[in-house]
Image (cartoon, helix red, strand yellow):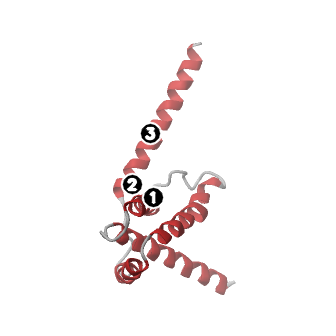
Amino acid sequence: MSKVIERWKQKARQLKAETYALYLAYKDPRVPWYAKVFAAMVVGYAFSPIDLIPDFVPVLGYLDDLVMVPIGITLALKMVPKTVLDECRQEAREVMTQGKPTNWVAAGAIVVVWVVSIALVLATLAQLVKK
């Protein structure tokens, strides 16, 4: 059991490093624009301290963390030129030893999405109650 837990921890550390490498690749001028856009979306969501689907929602709360983020990272990594990716991975390993970066702009965007969604639901409910 201890080996399984350690293997999962290693995979999580590797995923964080890959995400940060994508962040670095996003800023590199050698990366195509479409890869930058996709990488920015994946990195913004992965580094955001707030999830689009909160973790307390049964099953779906962890779906994004366990499935969507790794798939997004994998797809984005395939779009980045190998030489750029190798350089970014090396820099990411060095930076990640100092702690996990956080993207507060992405967190703010997710909060706005939730607030607008709640407002729309409340407005719809208010219209239904008036009828």
Out of 53 and 81, give the one closest to the viewer.
81
**Secondary structure category for the residue under label 2:** helix
Which residue is painted at 37% across and 75% down in the image?
A: 99
Out of 78 and 3, give the one closest to the viewer.
78
Mark number displayed over residue 45: 1
**Secondary structure category for the residue under label 3:** helix
Which residue is painted at 51% across and 51% down in the image?
A: 52
Q: Which quadrant is home to the C terminus?
A: top right
Looking at numbered disc 2 in the image, what kind of residue is underneath it?
Answer: Ala
Mark number displayed over residue 113: none
| Residue under numbered circle 2 | 106
Q: Position of residue 81 (x, y in %)?
A: 42, 75
Which residue is painted at 43% across and 49% down in the image?
A: 110
Q: Position of residue 51 (x, y in %)?
A: 49, 54
Q: Earlier in the sequence, mark 3 or mark 2?
A: 2
Disc 3 versus disc 1: distance between alpha carbons?
17 Å
Q: Quadrant of residue 24?
A: bottom left
Which residue is painted at 39% across and 72% down in the image?
A: 100
| Residue under numbered circle 3 | 115
